[in-house]
Amino acid sequence: MEPLIPPGARVRIERCAGAELIPGDVIAVARGAGCVLHRYLGPLAGGGRALLTKADRARRVDEPWRGVEFVGRLVAVSEGDDGAERPLAAPPLKRLMAAALWLAWLPAVMLGRARRRTRRGGVTS
């Protein structure tokens, strides 16, 4: 999650319900014995409790995470020796802008999936 979270930084995760997430939040999901932090994009359409995420530097969206893998939302980052926390709670306007960007971006994702299925022979026009 660079540049938001530098290597070696400590993070504070807050448990919350998946319904409380807003596109743009950074969330922790369980992977093996640890967790990964990725940007929350929204729920998978028709996917029940599945979550769509993406690393900030990744080109592609992650495979959907099942709701049981969701750990919580990132609320603060500690850098350096002093241990001072930098809160990450987004102001309401920033959350609204993130939601608007996600809604604008979603059709492109869905169109890309449909094109990939068409190339694989899964859907014909």
Image (spheres, grey):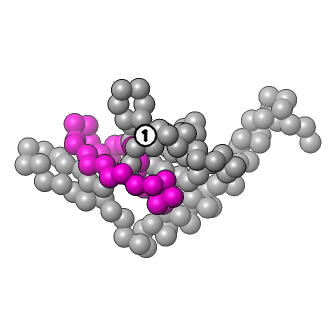
Q: Which residue is mark 1?
A: 29
Q: Nearer the viewer, residue 49 or 76?
A: 49
Pick out the residue farthest to the bottom.
Answer: 93
97 drawn magenta:
no
Q: Where is residue 85 shown, x and y percent of the image? A: 18, 54
x and y percent of residue 3 in the render? 32, 46
Residue 61 can be seen, yes or no: no
| Residue reaching furthest to the right | 125
Residue, x 35% and y 31% (percent of image)?
34
Residue at 64%, 54% (x, y): give it.
106
- Judge from the rendering whether residue 65 lies leftward or rightward of residue 39; answer left or right: right
Task: Assign a secondary structure to mark 1.
Answer: strand
Residue 30 sits in quarter: top left
* Image quadrant containing the C terminus: top right
> Which picture quadrant has residue 28?
top left
The answer to whether residue 31 is above or below residue 61 is above
As rendered, which of 32 and 112 lies closer to the eye?
Answer: 32
Q: Which quadrant: the N terminus?
A: top left
Left or right: 21 in relation to 122: left
Q: Residue furthest left?
A: 82
Q: Position of residue 117 (x, y in %)?
A: 78, 35
Span shown in magenta: 1-29
User: What's the residue type where badge 1 is placed?
Assistant: Val
Callout 1: 10 Å neighbours few (<14), some, many (20+)? many
Q: Which residue lies at the image location 29% right of the left edge and 45% below the top edge?
A: 5
Toward the viewer: 74 or 60? 74
**Residue 25 placement, left or right of 89:** right
* Magenta stretch: includes residue 11: yes
Evaluate whether residue 110 shows in this view. yes
Residue 35 pos. (x, y %)? 37, 35
